[in-house]
Image (spheres, helix red, strand yellow):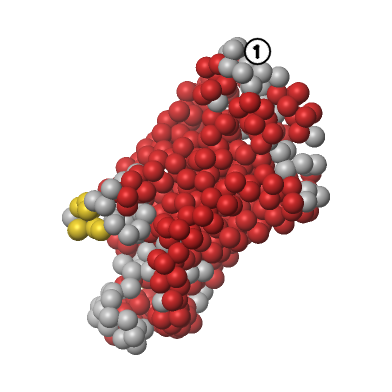
Amino acid sequence: MMNYEIDLEKVGRNIFPFYLTILFIAPIPFGANRPWAWSILAICAFTLLLIYLWSYARQNLRPPEITKDIKIIFILLVGWLFFQVFQLIPLPIELLGAISPKTLELKQSIIHMTGASFLPLSFDVSAGMRAIYKTVLYISLFALTICLVQSRDRLRLLILMIVFIGVIQAVWGLSLVFMQEKMRLAGEAQNFLNVVKGTFTNRNHFGGFINIAIAAAIALLLSSGLKEKRSIHREKLSHHWQSRALDWRIYLLPYLGLMLVALMFSESRGAMFTCAFMMMVMVTCAIYMKVSVADIFKKFQLIIWLVIFVVIFSGADALVERFNNFDEDLAIRMNHWQNSLMIFQDFSFFGVGAGNFQYLYPLYDNGFDKYRLLHAHNDYIELLVEQGVIGFGIIGAVILLCIKNAIQAIRQFQSLRQAAFAVASLLVISGFLMHATVEFNFQIPSNAIYFFVFLAIALLQGMESVHVEKRETVWDEEAFMQEEA
């Protein structure tokens, strides 16, 4: 009789390092915001998923345990992918005129496709194909997260890796600022003297990613307990000093502070508002679980004072200048949104095709902004324009189901330590949705990748195996937990 548990563990153990490698590399090449970068990631992620599925088929293994909501979400995600494929399929012009008359009108009058008998919903098929490749990347990593991260040990390792890459991004970005160097990025001179961008091409993209890393650091802080780390730090290093001195939990507070400082120096207004919103969500979760605000402030007071000090003595002038231009920038964005909503009114049900926003927008632009607009600076409006209410409804249902699972998981636990990863997934999802109102982080592949990973983490909170850990340690953690209680 086949030992399913051993075989399942072996398959996951062999593939998990490659999965982490993909996630680690994703933000490094300009946030994967180049066709060659996300294409390589898509090929690697899809190949890894095929290897995983082939291992089950070849060895006739039992599939991993999944909940009912996970099954529903997989169906929705596959449906979302097929809807994007449907937008590229040439349809009889009679059918196209019936389901999207404005599409047929524009293609015949402006693009002069009067002699064609079959036309697709999408205005640019190549752009639609690129969008499908990205969707395959996101779904593949979402599925790999569900299949591979089915224990608290692996979940902690995944979160730790996200914190690590966040620290690297913060150190790299701050180093470029303080060393006052100019670097050449993607063939154009990019000045790093004033703002932190990490390896991203834009401070807002960096801010979206660093908020994810901040939420991951908070999850590790809550899951291990701050008193535990202080106790480890106070102990004499006479026994097992290497393990205690190198324990990653001791350095979580400095790491979190470093990333918050990098966020301040990025001067991304949307990212800073998002970070503040995430903190409000965390406080709300703590109050719901009957943890006092005073206790939360006591745990994070060093970080709070550090950020205040940095803002006052280093970044106050730059931040004030950025916020002084808020009204002008908001007026430009609102004009973009109004024009984009006009597109949505004409293509409300099926959209103009995934990845096609930039090709349709010039037809509705009133000339308010002299620059070519690639994205709507509002992911909700852009999704509605490109995929209509159908695509918007499908991915919206996926996100709402994941949020529901995270909230249900928080309700089941008695302390923030137990609910740490559920809280982190809720922070990332809610923060990303907030930032999406003024930016386009869903269009930055590395940020979108991590968003889908945290959607999977939220779903995994409904599985009992994710809350069981078999980790061995060199000190008595139960004693520290009793002390904290």
Point out the residue furthest to the bottom here. 366
Residue 188 versus residue 139 in the image, above or below: below
Looking at the rendered structure, the number of numbered marks drawn on it comes to: 1
Q: Residue 229: x, y in percent?
A: 63, 31
* Whether residue 455 can be seen here: no
Identify which residue, 244 or 117, lies in the foreground: 244
Q: Residue 134: x, y in percent?
A: 40, 52
Please state if 421 lies on the left or on the right of 248 as rendered.
right
User: Image point 51% across, 74% down: which residue?
Assistant: 349
Q: Residue 314: x, y in percent?
A: 42, 58
Please state if 35 lies on the left or on the right of 144 as rendered.
left
Location of residue 360 by image quarter: bottom left
* Whether residue 464 can be seen here: yes
**Residue type at the position of mark 1:** Met
User: Image point 43% across, 51% down: which residue?
Assistant: 262
Q: How crowded is mark 1: few (under 14 residues within 10 Å), some or many (20 or more)?
A: few
Residue 30 versus residue 433 in the image, above or below: above
Mark 1: secondary structure: loop
User: Image point 70% across, 55% down: which residue?
Assistant: 283
Q: Residue 435: x, y in percent?
A: 51, 63
Location of residue 3 by image quarter: top right
Identify which residue, 48 or 454, lies in the foreground: 454
Identify which residue, 331 or 382, lies in the foreground: 331
User: Image point 64% across, 21% down: which residue?
Assistant: 235
Residue at which label 1 appears? 1
Identify which residue, 317 or 370, lies in the foreground: 317
Please state if 173 lies on the left or on the right of 187 as rendered.
right
Q: Which quarter shows the C terminus?
A: top right
